[in-house]
């Protein structure tokens, strides 16, 4: 399967990583459970996935149009999860699902790009509004395809060759977000461990990556407390080749 290729300067793209995460624009409240959405349909081409994501966003907006004005303002607040996480957690299941279970339209991604642009426009790299939109699009749509469809599936196929008697079960987007887990491993129907599949860049010594690793480590510990098994990082390239081969002994 073909990967998405970043079309803007890589340094400019990386410079928006920390703001993107700090503003919580990557949260399911903002973009939906993308790892669940991308599994809903067996997409053949990446363009089909992108079309589906925007169409799902249009469906969301049609549902929001039936809400009262106050409710519309709440679910359309791009930064609510950042400024008042408790307010989001206290919302009804139906309201939260309008944001977590659906994609977004291009207009919605443009609104996130404007928030991002207002934060990074003076970082000295000369980022434009169009480039910020591409940063948003690439993270939400392209990285999800590259990571879940290309890297993850290739990696699992390679792992199955190594562990033919192990069942790899893809978790829901909610479990992924809560515990930083991609797959649960079962042997004879018994949960034995879990893994999160990451690119080689996940091992870099950049501040924003270290912050992400620390956050995921905490989530993995919470998974261990709840389910009693360890979560292991599997670092792989787009072809699914395992970079940290030592993890195979742990699995």
Image: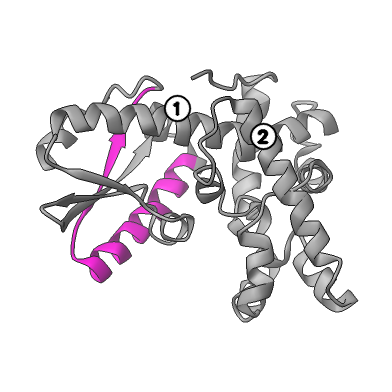
Label 1: element kind: helix
Extreme right residue here? Answer: 69
Q: How many marks?
A: 2
Q: Which mark is residue 150?
A: 1
Q: x, y (%) of residue 87?
A: 66, 78
Residue numbers of the magenta segment: 209-237
* Closest to the observer, 157 or 139: 157
Judge whether residue 42 can be spotted in this image.
yes
Relative vertical location of residue 177 with respect to residue 2 in this rendering, above or below:
below
Q: What colour scheme does the image use?
A: one colour
Relative vertical location of residue 9 with respect to residue 120 in this rendering, above or below:
above
Query: Image check: 6 left or right of 245?
Result: right
Q: Earlier in the sequence, mark 2 or mark 1?
A: 2
Q: Which mark is residue 127?
A: none
Q: Which mark is residue 50?
A: 2
Which secondary structure type mostly characterizes the magenta part of the structure? helix
C-alpha separation, residue under disc 2 versus residue under disc 1: 15 Å
């Amino acid at each position: 399967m073909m990967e998405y290729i970043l079309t803007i300067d890589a340094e400019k793209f990386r410079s928006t990583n920390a703001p993107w995460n700090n503003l919580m624009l990557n949260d399911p409240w903002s973009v939906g459970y993308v790892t669940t959405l991308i599994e809903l349909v067996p997409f053949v081409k990446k363009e089909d996935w992108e079309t589906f994501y925007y169409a799902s966003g249009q469906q969301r907006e049609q549902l929001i149009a039936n809400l009262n004005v106050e409710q519309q303002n709440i679910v359309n607040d791009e930064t609510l999860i950042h400024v008042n996480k408790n307010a989001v957690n206290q919302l009804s299941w139906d309201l939260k699902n309008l944001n977590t279970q659906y994609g977004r339209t291009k207009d919605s991604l443009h609104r996130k790009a404007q928030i991002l642009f207002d934060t990074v426009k003076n970082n000295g790299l000369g980022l434009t509004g169009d480039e910020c939109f591409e940063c948003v699009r690439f993270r939400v749509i392209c990285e999800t395809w590259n990571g879940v469809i290309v890297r993850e599936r290739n990696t699992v196929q390679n792992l199955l060759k190594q562990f033919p008697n192990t069942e790899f079960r893809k978790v829901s987007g909610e479990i992924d977000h809560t515990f930083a887990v991609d797959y649960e491993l079962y042997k004879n129907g018994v949960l034995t461990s879990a893994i999160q599949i990451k690119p080689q860049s996940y091992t870099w010594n950049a501040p924003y990556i270290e912050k992400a690793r620390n956050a995921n480590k905490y989530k993995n510990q919470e998974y261990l407390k709840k389910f009693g098994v360890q979560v292991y990082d599997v670092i792989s390239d787009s072809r699914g080749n395992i970079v940290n081969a030592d993890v195979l002994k742990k699995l």
